Image (cartoon, rainbow, N blue to C red):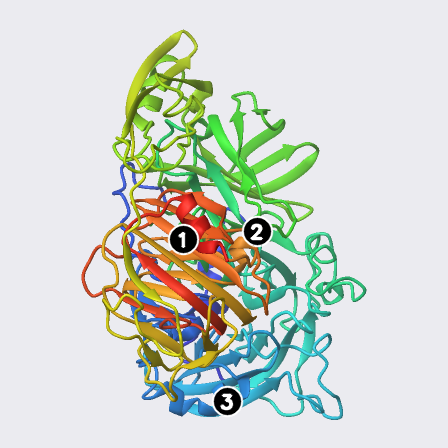
Amino acid sequence: MTRRPRARRASTALALTTTALVAAGALCAPAAAAKQPSDPPPPSFSDVTVHDPSIVTAGDEIWAFGSHGASAHTEDLMAWEQHTIDLSQNPDNALFEDIYTELAETFEWAQSSTLWAADVIQLPDGRFAMYYNACEGSSPRSALGIATSDAVDGPYENQGILLKSGMAGESENPGEIYDARVHPNAVDPDAFYDAEGDLWMVYGSYSGGIRILKMDAETGEPLPGQGYGTHLVGGNHSRIEAPTIQYDAATGYYYLYLSFGGLDASGGYDVRVARSKTPDGPYLDAEGNDMADVKADPSLPIFDDESIQSYGVKLMGGHLFTRELGDPGTGLGTGYVSPGHTSWYQDPATGRMFMVFHARFPGMGEQHEVRVHQMWMNEQGWPVVSPMRYAGETAGKIKRSEVLGTWQLVDMGKDITATAAESRDVTLEKDGRITGDANGTWEREGQHAATLTIDGESYSGVFAPVWDPDLETWSTGLTVVSDEGVALWGRQSVELTGADAVEAVIADLDLGDTDGVTIDLDLPTSGTGGTTITWTSSDDAVVTADGAVARPAVGEPDAHATLTATVTNGEASTQVPFEIIVLARTPGVLAGEWSFEDDLGDANGVFPDAVATGARIDAGAAAPAAFVDDGVSGSALRLDGTAGVRLPDDLVQGTSYSVGLWLRPEALTAYTSAFFAAGSQTNWLSLLPQGHSGVGGSTMLWAGSEQWYDAGTGRFLPTGEWSHVAFVVDGAAASVYIDGELRYEGGGFPDILSGDGNVFALGVNWWDAPFQGDVDELTVWSSALSPEDVADLAAR
C-alpha cells in the first residue's frame, strides 16, 4: 500500500479533493458554486516581488519561493508579505544560516552568486524539501540540489547536489557526453505528488528540454538509475522552461504548464499547457500534438521560436486592455508584459483553483510582481484563466443580462512575441450576436459557462465576476479557449459619447509641468468614444501645434506661449488653454572633472580623490587603480572587470545634472554600470554600455525608483574603440547622447538625487558584474548641458 503524505505541496492538493470537485459541478472542475455577494467590498492588495514563484502551504499560510532567494507568504492570495528578498540586495538570506557557505559547492559549480527558481514541497515525514538550483547564465552549466527544514521558512540544511548539467566529457546519463541540444539544463524544478501519492519532479529550461524523474518520497531524492529522466518537451535550445504539473481528479488528467519565450520584458514570455493521463506523459495539446516532438529546428539560429510557437494551449501572454484618454483608470491600460513561470494552488475546502505567476507591466520595464488569477476547467477539460487578478471573488451564477453590452476582447494568439495583444471593442448583443471589431455568436449556459464562435472558431470557458482596477468596481469577465488552443480574455467596458466624453477627456488631459518645459511635448489627438483633439499655438516660434519646442539660448529670457486644445465628440466641443513656459538654456556648472592622468584626483581640486573598490561599490579594493597610456587625452583609467572606482559622495544634488565620459569597452555585459549614482539601493541610475534586452541590448540610461526607467539609445558601443557617452537630466526630462548625437529624449525621469548622501561610482554598483574596459575624461555637471555643450565634450 502506498504511503500518503500527511501534508502536501499546495499545488498538488487536487488529488485529495475529488469529493469537493465533483460536488462543485457546473463544468468539468468548476469553482464551488456560490452567489457573488450583491455588494462585495473592494479588495485590498499588498504586492511582493518573487520571480518564478512556486507555491507550498504551511498551516493557514500559502508560501511562494522563487529565484534569487526571494520568498513571500499570504493567507488570502491578495495580501502578501515579503519574507526574503533578492540575494543581490541582501546576501544575509533568512532561509539558510549562511547561504553562501551552505551552498558553496553549488555556487562554485554554476559559477554564479545567485540562485534560480526554487521549489518547496512537504515530504511525508513533515519536513519541507527545497529544490534549489543555480546556473552560470550564458550556458547550461547548472546544479540542482535539495535542502530540508522542519519549518517552511527555514533555516534549510543542505542535503547535497542531485543533478548537474553543462559539464564536459560526461553527463548524468551513464556513457553519454553532455550535449546541450539533447540533455536538459538542471534548473526550474517542480516536485509534485501523483494521484497515488507518489512523488515526481519535473524540471528543465531551454537546452535539451523538459524532463521528469520519479522520486523517493522518504528522502526527496531521485530514485536511482534514471539519469536525467524521461524527456517530455523541447530540445535544440528551444525557449521552453518553467514546468509545473497539476493533477485534476475530476478530468483525470495531469496538466503540464510551461513558459515559452524569454522571461524579460522583450522576451515574449507566455503560459502554455498540455495534458496527459499519466505523470510521465505523453503530453498532448488541444490539437493532439505530442509535446515530446516540440523542439527548435536545428538548422535555424539558436532560440528559434517559429518552430515551437504553434504548439501547446496558450493560456496567457503579453496583453493590454487598452485605455484611451478619458476612459476610467490611468496610464496605458491594464495588462501584463511577459507573464509566466507559473505555479498553482487549490483551496482544499472549496476546490477553487488559482494560477500564481510573476508578471511585468506595460511601460514599467523589468519591474515584476507576483500575481494570482482564478482558474476553471472548460467543457473540454482545458484550464481557462480569469482575465483579472484574484480579488476574493467566487464564480457563482452570472445572469444573461449581466453580460450584454460593450466589451474589450483580447486574443492571445499563438505567437511568441514581445508585442502585447491589444484589446478589440465588441458588443455582445441581446440576440446572441457578437458585433464590432469581431463578428460571431455567444451563449451563456448553466451557472456561468460561455461558448463563443468568432470567425468560425469555437471557444469554451466561463463568464466570471472580476474586480476591474480601471473601473474600480466589480464587473464581469470572460475567459475561453478554442479547440486550436487559443485563449480569449474579455472585460466589460464603458462607452462615453457626446458631452460626457468631452468632459471625461478634458478631466484626463494633462501635459505635465508646463511651467518648466525643456523637451518637445507629446500632444494627444484622440480620446474615449471617438473624441478628437486638435491643437493650436499662439506662437509657433516657442511651441508648435504638434508639440515641438524651441528653447531660448543662454542669457535669453524664458519663452511663453499658449497651446489650445479643441476637444470634440459629435456636436459637443470645448476649448482648453494651456499656458506654456519654455525654459531658456542655462550655462554649464562643472561639479567635478577626472582626467585620470595616472591618478584619481579631481582636476579642479574641489573634491577629494576617488578611491579604488572591489567588485561592488562598497567593497574594499584588492589592488590600487590601474591606468593605460593611450587615453583620449594622456592616460586613462583601466578597469579589468573585477573592480571599480568610488567617486566622492554628494557630487551633485537635485534634479538637474549632466555626466559625460569616454568609454573603450573591452567586453560588454548586460546590466554592467559604466557610471552609477544612487540616493539609496532602491533609488538609483546607471549608465549601461550594454543595456538589457528590453532595449535590444543597446547602450542605455537605466533608473530604478518607484518604477523602472529605460532610456535605450538604439546604438551599440564598439569594443576596443573610444566612444563618448553623455546623459542630461533636466527636471523630469532625460537625454542620452553617443558621440555628441542625441540618441534618446524623454520625460518622466524619476527624482534620484534630491536627497543627501548620494553615492557615485565608475564600473560598479551594488549588484552586477563590473565594467571591463577603459574610462577617460569624466565630467560631472550640476546643471543641464545643452546639445551644443555635449557636442563640445565629444569633440576630440
Q: Residue at x 57, y 48 (%)?
A: 378
Q: Residue at x 60, y 89 (%)?
A: 223
Horizontal side of 739 relative to 654 (left or right) equals right
Please say whether residue 679 is visible from this viewpoint. yes
Cβ–Cβ below 8 Å for labels 3 and 1? no
Amino acid beneath label 1: Phe
| Residue 727 disc label | 1
Horizontal side of 357 relative to 717 (left or right) equals left
Amino acid beneath label 3: Glu
Cα separation, mark 3 vs mark 1, equals 38 Å
For residue 98, what is the image quadrant? bottom left
Q: Secondary structure at mark 1?
A: strand
Q: Pick the residue in front: 278 or 671.
A: 671
Instruction: Please rate how many residues cluster around mark 2, counting C-alpha atoms within 10 Å: few if below 14, some from 14 to 19, many from 20.
Output: many
Q: Who comes first in sequence, dot 3 or dot 1? A: 3
Residue identifier under label 3: 108
Q: Pick the residue in front: 502 or 657.
A: 657
Q: Secondary structure at mark 2?
A: strand
Cα separation, mark 3 vs mark 2, equals 38 Å
Q: Pick the residue in front: 4 or 567.
A: 567
For residue 653, what is the image quadrant? bottom left
